[in-house]
Image (tube, grey):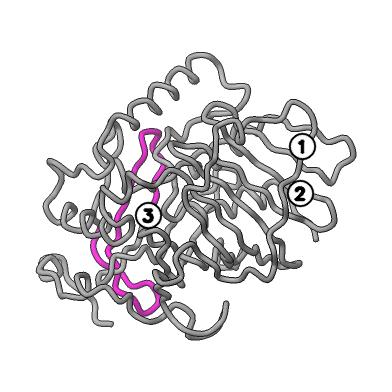
Amino acid sequence: MILSSDVLNRWCAFIGTWCRGVLLAAALSAGVHAQQLAEKQSYRESIQKLAPMNTEGLDSNLVHILNRYYKATFGGIDNWQTLESVRFDGRLHLENGVARFVAFKKKPDYCKMDVFAGGSAQLVMGYDGEDAWKINTSSSGAKPRGMSEKEARNFIRDASIGGPLLYPLIKGKTIELSGVEKVADYSCYKLVTTLPDGERIISYLDTSNYAERRQMTTNALTGLQEQTTYSDFRRVGGVRFPFAARMESGGKEVHRVEMQKIQLNIGMTPWMFQRPAEGYSPVEESNPDDVALIDEPEGTIPLGEGGFGSEGFGNTAFPDPESTEVDSILDKIGKPQR
């Protein structure tokens, strides 16, 4: 199988469905100059001090949607505060084959991803809050090196635990409600988030259960718009995750992701995300038979029936009684018929 660091960088958007960072998506890499580094550190410190779900002063319609989204996705602020780290195990479906991966995230913005490309080869990307690095172990004597400016921009944007809709009051950031649109057969609120550097992220939240059905971003490396559609939502530790995603760009499928297992708070430390001094010690590869395993089986709430890629995959309503009511806000902005 042919895999590149660009492929690895691009599928980060799946992990980023609810983890897409609020970090300054500027040119951050191992070679960033002192002023940029100081600005980035100041920004990172500021989000650690802000309330992640504070919507004070925002438009009332937007507040209504965000508050429902926070509760439905994260279980509210109390549950969010118990979340420290996440490990993802899954499969990456590409045009030329399937690769297994494992990804690690830790608050506030530590991230590392390993893709197993066959044999002993691994593609790895990491970010420790300051240094964005990568390594391809398929090359003899390969050593970790800093990402390019644009690679780092993509990766850091997707590094943190949270999402573009958290920290709505951060300086220089805006979230706007741009009406209601259809995603497949689902009626969705269209929310446009503009980060402090001007980058726009479009989120589509289901009007009945507030699941993020789709997200649209611009790839810093290619300049192309990428559309990621999510399905098979389940709860792990009170947090709702999509266990499947399909990315498209230019009307063509780029890849699909199938999650096998998600684990919370398994004891990660900051040093795990640092660039190795020499070489790289690969992590243990995921067990391919561990399909759809999660921390709390009794908490599994699938959206749909059938296997990955099946016609009925992810097409049933999320069983959340509180979010199935028809909200008065829909009368104000219009609700398309499903």
**Label 1 – label 2 distance at C-alpha:** 10 Å
Residue plotted at (30% across, 68% down): 206
Element under disc 3 = strand
Residue that label 2 marks: 122
Please determine whether, in this image, residue 225 is positioned above or below residue 328. above
Please determine whether, in this image, residue 95 is positioned above or below residue 140. below
Point out residue 336 in the picture as x, y percentages from the top left corner. 24, 77
| Location of residue 118 (image quadrant) | bottom right
Q: Amino acid at mark 3?
A: Ile
Q: Quadrant of the N terminus?
A: bottom right
Please determine whether, in this image, residue 31 is positioned above or below residue 139. above
Is residue 220 rendered to the left or right of residue 281?
A: left
* Discs 2, 3 touching: Cβ within 8 Å: no
Element under disc 1 = loop
> Residue 280 bears which disc, if any?
1
Q: Earlier in the sequence, mark 2 or mark 3?
A: 2
* Discs 1, 2 touching: Cβ within 8 Å: yes
**Label 2 – label 3 distance at C-alpha:** 32 Å
Instruction: Decide whether residue 194 is among the magenta residues.
Output: yes
Q: Earlier in the sequence, mark 1 or mark 3?
A: 3
Point out residue 93 in the picture as x, y percentages from the top left corner. 66, 67
User: Depth check: 280 or 154 in front?
Assistant: 280
Please tell me whether mark 1 or mark 3 is closer to you in this view.
Answer: 1
Tally of numbered tags: 3
Please tell me whether mark 1 or mark 2 is closer to you in this view.
Answer: 1
Residue that label 3 marks: 202
Element under disc 2 = strand
Residue range of the region highlighted in magenta in the rendering? 178-202
Residue plotted at (26% across, 42% down): 168
